[in-house]
Image (cartoon, rainbow, N blue to C red):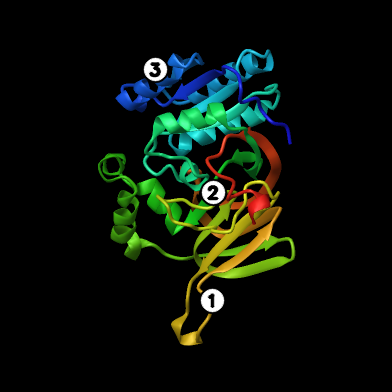
Amino acid sequence: MPQWETNRLKRLRLILHGKAAQDERVRATVRSVREDGHQISVRVTWEAGDAARFTREAVAEAARGEIDCIVAGGGDGTVDEVFVTAHQYRHFGNCSFGILPLGTANDFARSVGLRVDDLTACLRMIIDEPASRIDLGLLNGRPFVNIITGGFGARVTAETDPALKKALGSLAYLLTGVSRAREFQPCRGRFRAEGFAWEGMFLALAIGNGRQAGGGIPLCPDALIDDGLLDLLIVPKIDLTAGREAMTVRARSSWIEFEADEDVNVSIDGEPDQVRGFRAECRSRALPVHLGHDLLLTGRR
C-alpha cells in the first residue's frame, strides 16, 4: 500500500457544503492550518451538482500534481458525492481524500474515528497521517461509500424534516421513526449472495461497506472497509405465533442480489430512491482516504 508523504507542506482542496460557508469553526480551522504554511483552496457549493463539478476540477488538477488531498466538507451526502465522483474518474495521481465532518449524523466520519467535535484536529490529521485504501460499494453500478438501507429505515431517512434535523441532530431520525412506525408495511423480497439465499417478508435491510447509519445505529457492526466484502442485514417480519426465531439475518459477500414484489424505499448514503431489484458489488480498495483510526481495517479484525 503506498504511503502518502506526511513531512512536507500540503496543498488541499476543500469542497465545502454551502450551508457551512459561514460557520466560524470552519473559517478558524482553515486559518489555523494556513498559518502552518499549508495551502487550502476552498470551493463552496451553491446548487445540486456543484460538489461533483468541483471534484472533477480538483481531480484534473490532482492528476497534474497540483493538489495533494481533496477534502469533502459536509455530511454523509457530501462525502458520498465527492468520493464517488473521484472514483469514477480514477486518475488522480498521488492525491488522497479526507473528510471535514459538518453534517447532522456524520455516520461515516464517526465510524472511522474522526473527531467530529474538533474540526481543526480533523484537518490536521489529514495533513499529518497517511491515507489507507478503502473499498467502495456499487449499487447497480452506482458507487456508494457507507451504507444502503431499505424498508422502514430508508423511509425514515427520506421523510425526516430538514428543519428538525437542524434543530435536533440525529434525534430527529428517532422521532420520525416513532411517529411513522404504524404506517409502515413489511415487504417481500428475495436475497442471494455467495453461499447464501433468503426469501420472505422483511421490515428493513442494510448493505454495509461501513458500519452505521441513521445517526449512529450500528447496522453492520462487523463491517470492514478494506476486505473486499459487503455486509448484509435483513430484519424479517416476526411471526410471534410461529415460535422463536432470529430477529436478524446476516451474511457477508463480495456481491448481493435483491428482488422484491413491489418498489422498496432505499437510502444510498442518505440519498433516497426506490427500487424493485438491484445487484450490489464491492470495489476493493478503490480510494485512498485519511481515517481517524484503523478499527475498520482488516489488520484489526
- Circle number at residue 31: 3
Residue 97: percent from the left, percent from the top? 58, 29
Does residue 70 appear to the left or right of 185 in the view shown?
A: right
In the rendered view, would you say 46 is above or below 271?
above
Residue 193: percent from the left, percent from the top? 70, 60
Furthest-left residue in this view? 167
Does residue 255 appear to the left or right of 170 in the view shown?
A: right
Does residue 192 appear to the left or right of 245 in the view shown?
A: right
Q: Residues within 10 Å of mark 1 (few under 14, many from 20)?
A: few
**Residue 90 visible to the viewer:** yes
State how far apart marks 3 and 2 are (Cα). Answer: 33 Å
In the rendered view, would you say 88 is above or below 185?
above
Residue hosting label 2: 147
Q: What is the secondary structure assignment of the residue under circle 1? A: loop
> The N terminus lies in which quarter of the figure?
top right
> The C terminus lies in which quarter of the figure?
bottom right
| Residue ID at (58%, 50%) | 295
Nearest the viewer among 198 and 163 is 163
To which quarter of the image does residue 118 belong? Answer: top left
The three-letter amino acid code for the residue at tag 2 is: Ile
The earlier-in-sequence mark between 1 and 3 is 3
| Residue ID at (36%, 41%) | 104
Residue 169: percent from the left, percent from the top? 31, 45
Residue hosting label 1: 246
The earlier-in-sequence mark between 1 and 2 is 2
To which quarter of the image does residue 64 belong? Answer: top right
State how far apart marks 1 and 3 are (Cα). Answer: 53 Å
The three-letter amino acid code for the residue at tag 1 is: Ala
The three-letter amino acid code for the residue at tag 3 is: Arg
Furthest-front residue in this view? 7
